[in-house]
Image: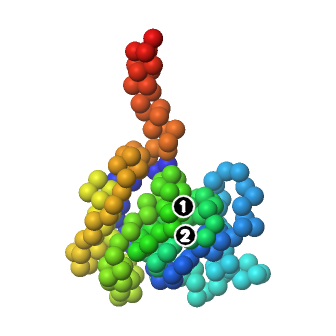
Amino acid sequence: MEKIELLKSSCIPLPIEDVDTDQIIPARFLKATTKEGFGQNLFRDWRYHSNDTPKEDFILNNSIYSGSILVAGKNFGCGSSREHAAWSLYDFGIRVVISSFFADIFQGNALNNGLLPITVDDAFLDHLFQEIEKDPRVQVEVSVPDQTVRISSTGQVRSFDLDPYKKLCLINGYDDIDYLLSIKEKIEQFEFSKI
């Protein structure tokens, strides 16, 4: 996984509430056994017509919007517990999702796969959508060490909660196994001290 310490990016706005995991990655694309390639089918039914031509009015097909931060409506990632939703966002190039509420299982899956879900209050989320609408290139700065998100154009800052262990993993680019390998010597010392 990529390290996330300080990320500054423009945003992709998706002001839709109750986006479920089947909309993020439809079930018919869940047959692969590796994480690669899921990004091409992110929001597949919203992005493409049945003949595989892009829907011009969908935000991911609009070249005005780009970046590694997705700003989403309330209750993002609800529905089934498929980890593939986090995989598809990450594979597409999204590293942070900002919303006012996330489904618990999606939130856990995201953090386990190097994707940072940031929960902000409704007022800040609305303000962020307004700033993106005014200027699609507006920059948002996310600091994982400080646990803050800042809108460059207005200077507004919000703090966000983050589990200390997941924070350590994001900053170092660790998954759970990488973390265990990073403390291998300590584990061995503990084991040998018991003999």
* One can see residue 85 in this view: yes
Question: Please, is residue 99 above or below residue 112 in the view?
Answer: below
Q: Is residue 51 left or right of residue 152?
A: right
Q: Position of residue 15 (x, y in %)?
A: 47, 83
Q: Is residue 49 left or right of residue 47?
A: right
Looking at the rendering, which quadrant does residue 24 occupy? bottom right
Question: Please, is residue 138 above or below residue 187 in the view?
Answer: below
Q: Position of residue 114 (x, y in %)?
A: 48, 54
Work out whether mark 2 precedes mark 1 in sequence or the reverse, and give the earlier one. 2
Residue beneath the point at 64% across and 55% down: 36
Contact check, label 2 and label 1, Cβ < 8 Å? yes
Under mark 1, the amino acid is: Ile
Q: Position of residue 116 (x, y in %)?
A: 43, 60
Under mark 2, the amino acid is: Gly
Residue beneath the point at 43% across and 25% down: 187
Quadrant where the C terminus sits is top left
* One can see residue 67 in this view: no
Query: For mark 2, what is the residue?
Result: 77
Q: CA distance from mark 2 to mark 1?
A: 8 Å
Say which element carries label 2. loop
Q: Nearer the viewer, residue 195 or 118?
A: 195
Looking at the rendering, which quadrant does residue 27 occupy? bottom right
Residue beneath the point at 71% across and 51% down: 33
Report how many numbered discs are placed on residues in the image: 2
Question: Please, is residue 72 above or below residue 176 in the view?
Answer: below
Say which element carries label 1. helix
Comparing marks 2 and 1, which lies closer to the viewer?
Answer: 1
Query: For mark 1, what is the residue?
Result: 105
Question: Please, is residue 181 above or below residue 165 in the view?
Answer: above
